Amino acid sequence: MSYDRNLNFLNTNRIVYRRGPVSDKPDEVYEWGEVYHNGTYECYDLFRTKAKITTYKSLKWHLLVIWYLNPQLDQDNFEYIARYIIEKRNGFVTFNMSEHVLKNIIYEVSMYDLEEPPKNKLRKIIFKDTCRLTPSEKLSIVGTIIGKSKSVSADDIYEAMLTLNEMRETITVKKLASYFNCSTRTIYRNITQELKKEKELLNSQL
């Protein structure tokens, strides 16, 4: 059985799960958002799409980001939040977990040195939560801006994949090439094995 994700729990408990760049400054600012020509690693944007957490590795990263973005949490409060996310019927994950593994993951995350930000994907375009653009309009902007650089990175492809998923469209190499105005060969050359798995995962959850 598939469960809908319950973000109300995080919002009610005032848990931060999205944060824009802090020290990196945008090169271009628009009503809809910001553009970073060289990209930024400082944007954390959990649960942006309907795709769920499907692996222990991904779960650990999500919990690590929450731990990092919410320094007010003590160990007990963090465990309370983590247990809610880990519970399959709350709609965040697709699998059940043993108590032993659960405790190990919570412990490992809580021992992480928060002086070092969690590893993150590079973002060049960040849309405001309040912007009213449709997913199709967002994807058009991404394709136009990234296309000007004449180079498409794995992170650029990932951004486009998430937007296609938000549009409830099946992700294909041909669609990605079309939006970046490049050849399918360029997409094949830059799409990593990890992104191929992510593409299949996103498509399977439509």
Image (spheres, helix red, strand yellow):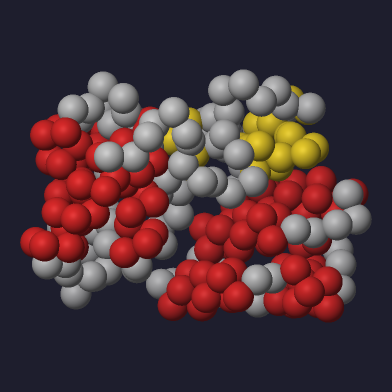
117, above or below 96, in the image = above
Taking the spot 51% from the left edge, 46% from the top edge, the residue there is 119
Q: Quadrant of residue 193?
A: bottom right
Q: Say left or right for 56 vs 144.
A: left
Where is residue 52 drawn, in percent x and y? 36, 62
Q: Say left or right for 41 vs 111.
A: right
Q: Quadrant of residue 28?
A: top right
Q: Quadrant of residue 199?
A: bottom right
Taking the spot 52% from the left edge, 70% from the top edge, the residue there is 198
Taking the spot 71% from the left edge, 40% from the top edge, the residue there is 39
145, above or below 192, in the image = above
158, above or below 8, in the image = below
Quadrant housing the C terminus: bottom left
Where is residue 154 drawn, in percent x and y? 69, 61
Query: In the rendered picture of this protein, how many numbered marks are placed on residues?
Result: 0
Residue 52 visible (yes or no) = no
